[in-house]
Amino acid sequence: MDHALHLAQLLQQQAPLRVTDAAELLGVSLSTAHRLLAMLVYRDFAEQGDDRRYHPGPVLRAVEPSEAPTVLMRRAALPHLQELVERVEESANVMVLVGDEVRFIATVECRQVLRVGDRAGLALPAHLASGGKALLASLGASAFEALYASRADVDVARLRRELAVIRKRGYALNDQQTEPGLTAIGIALPDPDGHPAAAVSISMPAARFNRDKLPTLVAALSTTAAKIEQALAAGLSLTSASRSESVVR
């Protein structure tokens, strides 16, 4: 049941998916992934297109999809998230902006007994999460206004001031704003065209957070973001070349 629910979340965030994509994302065999997708199709959580890839079905279609190439993003990010975790010994995440929320598309957990667990599939308010704030700070004024101008539940003036500080210093901090006992640091990750595609964050128990370590943590995040950006650019180039080759054939 947990695999089926996780797969339904992935369809919302990363569709279209092939059976091989589902198997890789869930860490299960191809036969298990095929069985889970067939069950979701039967229950109207998924639909299979003419290209044999799976899309959200009627039950899931009301959720706004992310425009980020999240499957490619996840593949590009995971090895570098693992390096980051080994370097800082805290959990690390990649997330994308969907409306006024951020959705986690990948997490690598650290090995410490007290740690922040896997957050893949979780959605949080963008104005509270570290990666969400980093992404909001990267938006133009009109895009920000479209999301928050009419929000009575958010102190928009205060948020604007916080985002200005984030733009100046280059990172965002979530000190127990989304969850008691959790602190996270996030930076925006641009796509090859320079637009904000995702955010990378380090999350840790608040008891282990030390502001004196911020420069080291931010430097590690920046290095990781640069590596993911390079991997993403290489992946997009390969994808474009493959498509061009298919057209020629």
Image (tube, grey):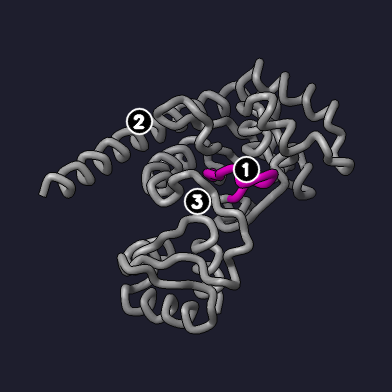
Q: Nearer the viewer, mark 3 or mark 1?
A: 3
Q: CA distance from mark 1 to mark 2?
A: 23 Å
Question: Which residue lies under the disc numbered 1?
Answer: 203
Q: Is residue 208 visible?
A: no
The residue at 63%/63% (across/down) is 62
Report whether 202 appears left or right of 152: left
Callout 2: helix, strand or loop?
A: helix
User: Which amino acid, by three-letter code, is at mark 3?
Assistant: Ala
Q: Residue at x 60, y 42 (%)?
A: 97
**Type of the residue with mark 2:** Gln
Read off the magenta span.
Answer: 92-103
Q: Find the distance from the CA under tag 3 to the CA under tag 1.
A: 13 Å
Q: Nearer the observer, disc 1 or disc 2?
A: 2
Residue 101 magenta: yes
Residue at mark 2 to residue at mark 3: CA–CA distance:
18 Å
Contact (Cβ within 8 Å) of mark 3 with mark 1: no
Is residue 233 at least partly visible in the picture? yes
The residue pinned by badge 3 equals: 106
Q: Earlier in the sequence, mark 2 or mark 3?
A: 3
Label 2 belongs to which residue?
Answer: 230
Q: Residue 18 lies in magenta, yes or no?
A: no
126 w.r.t. 166: above or below: below
Of the residues under marks 3 and 1, which one precedes in the sequence?
3
Q: Is residue 74 left or right of residue 168?
A: left
Q: Nearer the viewer, residue 44 or 205?
A: 44
